[in-house]
Image (cartoon, rainbow, N blue to C red):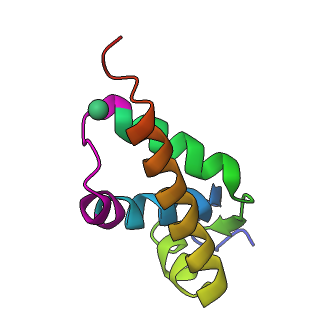
Amino acid sequence: MENEQQKIFNVRNVSEDLVDFYLDECMVRHGACSCSRCIADIRAYALNQLPPRYVVTTAGSAFARARAMSTQAKADIISAISTGINLVKKNPRHDD
Ligand SMILES: [Zn+2]
């Protein structure tokens, strides 16, 4: 232990990484407003629909693990984003 290089371990929710990864593509496909308020509302909606998926990581390793997730989990993420986009399109809050 004493001679081992110091590694920093973090706990990370890879659902967040994956929502961010698929968000742009989904927003373009659905013609969503891309102002920062709408993006935040869509992210919040999608993340509230999805189970958190925490992993222990060292720097840089989280996304590789996220990409190894099942096809069904990815489909769930894209579906949650798409539902969020449709709700935000119906009730945009960017005029407040
Ligand atoms: Zn907007």
Residue 49 position in % (x across, y down): 68, 53
Residue 22 position in % (x across, y down): 40, 67
Give the side of residue 17 with respect to residue 10, left or right: left
The magenta span reads 25-37
Residue 10 position in % (x across, y down): 63, 57
**Residue 1 colored magenta?**
no
Whether residue 48 appears in this view of the structure is yes
Does 8 appear above or below 2? above
Give the side of residue 67 with respect to residue 56, left or right: left
Does 18 appear above or below 93? below
> Ligand 1, what quadrant?
top left
Q: Residue at x 39, y 66 (%)?
A: 21
Q: Quadrant of the C terminus?
A: top left
Q: Residue at x 50, y 66 (%)?
A: 18
Q: Quadrant of the N terminus?
A: bottom right
Which of the 4 image quadrants contains residue 15?
bottom right
Which of the 4 image quadrants contains residue 29?
bottom left
Q: Residue at x 51, y 75 (%)?
A: 61
